[in-house]
Amino acid sequence: MLTKKFKRCRQACNDCVPVPEKLETYTTIEVSAMKNMYIAVIAGTLAAMSSAMQAQAGGAEIYNAKCMACHASGAAGAPKVGDTAAWAPRIATGMDALVASVTNGKGGMPPKGACADCSADDIAAAVEHMVGNSK
Ligand code: HEC
């Protein structure tokens, strides 16, 4: 009788071991609960990482899309990104002053650096990206 049962089990499932039914159920639940916990932790970490990366990429993306036209070539007298000499005196005025210049427009630069749909955060992120690459 017992041998028969065991044989049937081996046929159905290669991993089956001859343990009492209750213990087997318990083990399965434990393992799947742990798996879920790991998945939750990993998912949480990934979400945190990708949102941090998005915040960083945001400034670069806005710069590439909206600001590079002038600030890569120096068009209209714009300080070129990477030109440390041109940026040093501007950086010295502080981030708030730089962001205000962009928001209000300055010289050849139209208000918001011509990015009408940029939020204040977008402008600040783009300025930070430019300043970070110009020191
Ligand atoms: C149409 C060309 C043009 C575009 C587009 C443009 N800029 Fe400018 N930007 C300029 C010019 C010209 C200056 C120099 C202004 C001056 O000092 O007279 C300038 C200056 C700046 C400064 C220095 C401000 C200061 O106080 O010295 C920052 C920061 C800046 N731009 C950021 C940006 C950002 C961010 C964007 C995109 C959202 C952008 N710019 C788009 C032309 C442009």
Image (cartoon, rainbow, N blue to C red):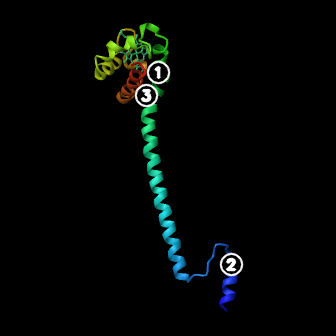
Sequence order check, earlier mark of 2 and 1: 2
Q: Can residue 96 be seen in this view?
A: yes
Q: In this view, does 37 lie above or below 111?
A: below
Q: Mark 3 points at which residue?
A: 59
* Disc 2 versus disc 3: nearer the observer: 2
The span from disc 2 to disc 1 (Cα, nearest Å) is: 66 Å
Query: N-terminal of the two: label 1 or label 3?
Result: 3
Give the residue furthest to the top.
Answer: 77
Q: Residues within 10 Å of mark 3 (few under 14, many from 20)?
A: many
Q: Name the residue under label 2.
A: 10
Say what secondary structure mark 3 lies in.
helix
Nearer the N terminus, badge 2 or badge 3? 2
Instruction: Give how far across and how far down residue 127 sits, in percent.
Output: 38, 23
Residue 1, relative to residue 134: is it above or below?
A: below
Judge by depth and name the residue closer to the eye, 14 or 95. Answer: 14
Residue 4 position within the rendered picture, expressed as x and y whole percent measured from the top left: 69, 88
**Mark 1 sits on what residue?**
66
Which three-letter amino acid code belongs to the residue tagged 1?
Answer: Lys
Callout 2: few (<14), some (14-19), or many (20+) C-alpha neighbours within 10 Å? few
Q: Which residue is drawn at 49% across and 11% down?
A: 73
**Farthest bottom residue?**
1
Ligand 1 near label 1 (Cβ, under 8 Å)?
Answer: yes
